[in-house]
Image (cartoon, helix red, strand yellow):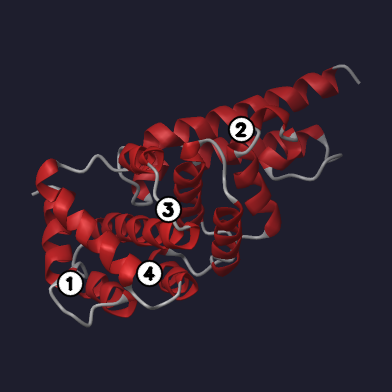
């Protein structure tokens, strides 16, 4: 049985309750998948992305076809499960709980409990991918994403590094992209670069619970990291 079959069964069960909200959804993920930590991680990531995408759409006020396509780039949902994913999306969008409550509960569900948790950065990266799909990140989307980062305990330097990968990449400060202070010795820059490449290896991403489709998006992240490192290396070579 695929993850989408399991997720579909789970969504059908949760959304059948009229009182289902973020607390019910989170508790259901913990309970239903308690015996399979790997599956629980993958389901938790998917639920977080679906629910927070819905909250971002509500904050922005519109959902464009470009954003729908960007969502489908992260999740190749089988036609048989499209209805169940839409049910969870609508459940989150209708829920009177604010997006900050959703973000906090999703952080508790998916996160490690530490600042700059990699899986929470992955979720934020996915939200950026959807937000920029129509060509720009609107003001309300930007405010939403920044607040999500604060709730996820992603510090400002990490947030700026993620932002730089999605907004005006051509002119992005390579040190910001790598999340390292300008003027650091090149050995520290290289150490930081190697850590980022290691953290974003496909095996690491899958182990964190990301769906296979997300790996395609992660290639953009790695390309930005490589370009930033090469830019720094070239600049230092000519000093």
The residue where tag 4 is placed is 109
Looking at the picture, does residue 123 appear above or below residue 171?
below
Q: Badge 4: how crowded within 10 Å, few (<14), some, or many (20+)? A: many
**Which of labels 1 and 4 is toward the front?**
1
Marks 2/1: CA distance?
Answer: 39 Å
- Between label 1 and label 3, give the one nearer the viewer: 3
- Tally of numbered discs: 4
Residue 225 — which label?
Answer: 2
Q: Nearer the viewer, mark 4 or mark 3?
A: 3
Vertical order, 204 against 144 (above or below) = above
Q: Residues within 10 Å of mark 2 (few under 14, many from 20)?
A: many
Instruction: Give the structural element (helix, strand or loop) at label 4.
Output: helix
Residue furthest top in the image: 238
Q: Position of residue 58 (x, y in %)?
A: 42, 62
Q: Is residue 37 visible?
A: no
Is there a contact, CB below 8 Å, between mark 4 and mark 3?
no
Q: CA distance from mark 2 to mark 4?
A: 28 Å
Report how far apart the C-alphas of labels 2 and 3 lie in the structure: 31 Å
* Residue at the disc numbered 1: 14
Kindly indicate whether the residue at mark 3 contacts the one at mark 1 (C-beta within 8 angstroms).
no
Disc 2 or 1, which lies upstream in sequence? 1
Which is closer to the viewer, label 2 or label 3?
Answer: 3
Q: What residue appears at the point 72 percent right and 42 percent down from the top-left corner?
A: 176
Q: CA distance from mark 4 to mark 3?
A: 27 Å
Q: Residue at x 31, y 55 (%)?
A: 46
- SS class, disc 3: loop
Instruction: Locate the C terminus by quadrant.
Output: top right
Whichever of labels 1 and 3 marks the residue nearer the N terminus, that label is 1
Whether residue 123 is situated above or below residue 150 in the rendered picture: above
């Amino acid at each position: 049985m695929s993850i989408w079959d399991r997720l579909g069964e789970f969504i059908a069960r949760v959304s059948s309750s009229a009182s289902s909200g973020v607390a019910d959804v989170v508790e259901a993920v913990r309970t239903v998948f308690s015996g399979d930590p790997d599956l629980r991680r993958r389901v938790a990531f998917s639920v977080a992305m679906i629910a927070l995408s819905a909250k971002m759409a509500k904050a922005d006020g519109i959902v464009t076809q470009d954003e729908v396509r960007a969502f489908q780039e992260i999740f190749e949902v089988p036609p048989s499960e499209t209805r169940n994913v839409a049910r969870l999306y609508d459940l989150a969008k209708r829920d009177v709980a604010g997006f900050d409550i959703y973000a906090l509960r999703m952080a508790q569900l998916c996160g490690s409990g530490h600042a700059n948790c990699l899986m929470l950065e992955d979720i934020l990266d996915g939200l950026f991918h959807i937000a920029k799909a129509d060509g720009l990140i609107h003001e309300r989307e930007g405010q939403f994403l920044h607040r999500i980062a604060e709730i996820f305990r992603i510090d400002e330097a990490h947030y700026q590094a993620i932002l730089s990968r999605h907004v005006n990449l051509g002119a992005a400060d390579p040190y910001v992209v790598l999340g390292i202070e300008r003027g650091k010795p090149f050995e520290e820059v290289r150490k930081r670069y190697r850590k980022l490449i290691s953290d974003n290896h496909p095996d690491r991403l899958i182990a964190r619970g990301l769906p296979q489709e997300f790996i395609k998006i992660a290639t953009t992240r790695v390309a930005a990291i490589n370009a930033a490192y090469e830019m720094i290396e070239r600049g230092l070579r000519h000093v």
